[in-house]
Image (spheres, coloured by chain):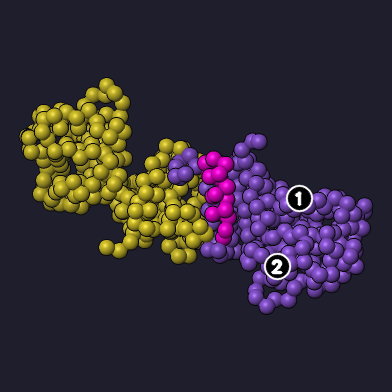
Chain colours: A yellow, B purple
Amino acid sequence: MAITGKTLLTATIGDPVDHLQAPESMGAWFAEHEVDAVWLGFHVRPEGLADFIGGLRALENLPGFTVTMPHKHAIIPLLDEVSERVRRCGACNLIRREPGGRLVGDIADGIGFVAGLKDSGVTVAGRHLWLVGAGGAGTAIAWAVADEGPAAITIVDVDPARQDRLAGAVREAYPAISVATGRPDLKTVDIAVNATPSGLHPGDPLPYEPAELRPDAVAVDIIMKPPVTALLVKARGLGLKTVPGQKMLDGQLRIYAEYMGLAPRG
Amino acid sequence: MAITGKTLLTATIGDPVDHLQAPESMGAWFAEHEVDAVWLGFHVRPEGLADFIGGLRALENLPGFTVTMPHKHAIIPLLDEVSERVRRCGACNLIRREPGGRLVGDIADGIGFVAGLKDSGVTVAGRHLWLVGAGGAGTAIAWAVADEGPAAITIVDVDPARQDRLAGAVREAYPAISVATGRPDLKTVDIAVNATPSGLHPGDPLPYEPAELRPDAVAVDIIMKPPVTALLVKARGLGLKTVPGQKMLDGQLRIYAEYMGLAPRG
């Protein structure tokens, strides 16, 4: 669809923005759903973020935007309201602009992950999920997964302090979930999630050994490039169900549009 | 071309923006010239303009923008530098964003008009141009035409104060040009320009009577809708050469792109 004066504007703010996939993937989503909106990359450096966000409050035809590196933390104090999820994660990447310029923020990474699991037919409720990696993505996933009512979550990270801090916070907020740390008995794991960068580059070690999982377990990777990581190749070879990183992104597209009021009904 | 994170952003800032033609016409121009850039409408109300412009200084992938109603005057004090033309016209509509966020402004209406005349094979140098209308568009045209070295300019407006003010200023700045006011002997006119709104609506009176011009005179209208006004219909019927308002817009497209450093060489 050609851009006109009526076209609504949405964007990802980042530094850099050259590599962004959202302009193309959300552009295709808008076209598919016949939404007259466009997704842009806004290249803003850290020192310009506060002024830029102040200016966006005045942009009447911008229903919302997302932020990526390095702004996910710095954006928080510039907003009028953030969700409990943002406070827990200490990061925000999804912002709605309300009439009058009020800015409200959430974080979509974890809920996109859960939506991607659901789209793949994977249920979290009542299961044991092993989360490998407690960084930014892992933290967002832990909180979104906890909302789904799993029986147990085990969290491991190369940084024990980060691992224990996240596990402790989830345990306190969700007393009904059995929260542990470290390496569990892999035969008890239903869903094993790689939320580390291991697998981005050829020759990276596997984040875990899929052969140690039960044959009915699900192997999940959040890495999007390559689309099928060495971890998932091996898991598939063993006959395990797998969910690739692209599913997490797919789950986010509708979440972005819905949050900004741009998703068509039905 | 699909929008990616590498696509440069340009826009028109206005209130409203629904009716803008630039997103489509400049979008087509960029596509034709294989420039990876997009033209948007930025809907900003007067009370938000200063904050919004402050924010745009931080938008690294925005090489420039234009402004339209009601911001053409209010934008001036928000910029770092404006051309002599802007100071003369008291209006600015074309802004370049330089590295570091510096904003430099010019006004393209008049130079687009002159470019449109040139594209139509009409020379201003040495000729007598009659300008009917001394409002915003007429003022921009008067100053751009004066730069081309006409022998004479005659300016008429329904508001005699406005007419005399513009004529006096042009006379002072360009002593070599014979500047007069009111209605000239139409047989001495080489180029007769309608810069009033008369002709936008069916039944509007003609801004002047083309039958009174010489057969080798040129009738020009800046009105774009309808594409051929009643004035031009009558002038064509008399065998006069005519230049429609669309030519002024066409002349502006390359000027916009060049000013922002987006025009391909050659």
Disc 2 chain ID: B
Q: What's the residue at 90%, 62% (across, down)?
A: B188
Circle 1: residue type: Gly
Position in image of residue B176 (x %, y %): 93, 52
Picture disc at residue B121: 1
Q: Mark 1 vs mark 2: same chain? A: yes
Q: Could you say which is closer to the camera, residue B66 or residue B47?
A: B66
Please give the range of residues in magenta. Answer: B20-37
Q: Does residue B158 sit above or below A83 in this rendering?
A: below
Q: State whether residue A190 appears in this view.
A: yes
* SS assignment at label 1: loop
Q: Does residue A214 sit above or below B70 in this rendering?
A: above
Quadrant of the drawing holding the N terminus of chain A: bottom left
Q: Earlier in the sequence, mark 1 or mark 2?
A: 1
Q: Residues within 10 Å of mark 1 (few under 14, many from 20)?
A: few
Is residue B21 located in the magenta-colored stretch of the structure?
yes
Is residue A183 located in the magenta-colored stretch of the structure?
no
* Residue with the most extreme bottom position: B203
Q: State whether residue A88 appears in this view.
A: no
Left or right of A70? Residue B156 is right
Residue identified by numbered label 2: B233
Left or right of B236? Residue B216 is right
Q: What's the residue at 60%, 64% (across, down)?
A: B46
Snapshot quadrant of residue A196: top left
Circle 2: residue type: Val
Quadrant of the drawing holding the C terminus of chain A: bottom left
Q: What's the residue at 63%, 66% (across, down)?
A: B225
Disc 1 chain ID: B
* SS assignment at label 2: helix
Position in image of residue B129 (x %, y %): 84, 59
Q: Could you say which is closer to the camera, residue A188 or residue A8?
A: A8
Q: Residues within 10 Å of mark 2 (few under 14, many from 20)?
A: few
